[in-house]
Amino acid sequence: MVEYQQNILYTYYIRAGRNYVPARLRIVPKGRSPEERGPMQPQEEIMSVERTFTIIKPGALQRRLVGEIISRFETKGFRILGMKTMKIPLEIAEEHYNEHVGKAFYESLLTYMISDPAVVMVLERENAVDSLRKLAGATNPDSAEPGTIRGDYGVTTKKNIVHASDSLKSAKREIAIFFKEEEIINYTDSLKEWY
Ligand code: CMP
């Protein structure tokens, strides 16, 4: 039997219409495995709330697509925790894209990213990283499915329209590059109260 070393705090989310809401917090005592905890109720699904990071790139501002793109984020249920317009300094762009150093497109990517203002955002929802990647679509707009942001608005890979973090680890790293802690506002999701 697996012996668990720590108490584990699980947040359960249940589906409420088209949204997920926290159902309750449940403590699984030290030493008890998920098997001992007993089966989950059929209506319950575990979803983890994540933060992710996006850049609405300079071309989107020039083409007046910012509102349209943010609308897609909101419609998909993302909460906006941080957002600012900035002309990205070269050193920030270099840090953000350091994994691409040496690639053929690196220099032109940096030139594009610092050319004009961009909008950077911290977004939150359940399964945020994968969800935003799907919504953004494939990097190459020609391969991106219609209905995705890149599929609908992207024209070239080099000047694609949004960046979306590719993992939770990248999201944490990228958020820390662009945002100070106090620029990220955490708040209760009270969506249901407004309807
Ligand atoms: P982004 O999601 O911001 O992450 C890295 C960026 O590099 C990518 O979007 C594209 O804008 C760019 N990129 C990736 N691959 C290529 C490529 N083959 N040619 C030109 N640009 C690329």
Image (cartoon, helix red, strand yellow):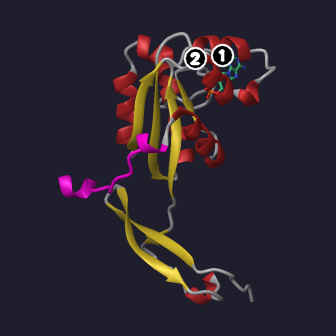
48 or 122, nearer to the observer: 122
Q: What is the magenta range?
A: 181-195
Q: CA distance from mark 2 to mark 1?
A: 6 Å
At numbered mark 2, what does the secondary structure look like: helix, strand or loop? helix
When asked about the image quadrant of residue 74, the answer is top left
Q: Are marks 2 and 1 in contact (CB under 8 Å)?
A: yes
153 or 60, nearer to the observer: 60
Asked if the magenta segment contains residue 115, the reply would be no
Q: Amino acid at mark 1?
A: Leu
Residue 31 is situated, as x and y percent measured from the top left of the image, at: 65, 88
Is residue 10 positioned above or below 51 on the image? below
Q: Residues within 10 Å of mark 1 (few under 14, many from 20)?
A: many
95 or 63, nearer to the observer: 95
Is residue 22 positioned above or below 25 on the image? above
Report the residue at 45% width, 70% height from top.
Answer: 12
**Would residue 8 be found to the left or right of residue 183 on screen?**
right
Residue 122 is situated, as x and y percent measured from the top left of the image, at: 47, 40
Residue 128 is situated, as x and y percent measured from the top left of the image, at: 51, 48
Residue 185 is situated, as x and y percent measured from the top left of the image, at: 38, 46
Report the residue at 63% width, 85% height from top.
Answer: 35
Is residue 64 positioned above or below 121 on the image? above
Asked if the magenta segment contains residue 193, the reply would be yes
66 or 144, nearer to the observer: 66
Q: Which residue is mark 2?
A: 113
Q: Amino acid at mark 2?
A: Met
Q: Residues within 10 Å of mark 2 (few under 14, many from 20)?
A: many
Report the residue at 52% width, 60% height from top.
Answer: 48
For ligand 1, the image quadrant comes to: top right
Is residue 127 positioned above or below 53 on the image? below
Q: Which residue is mark 1?
A: 109
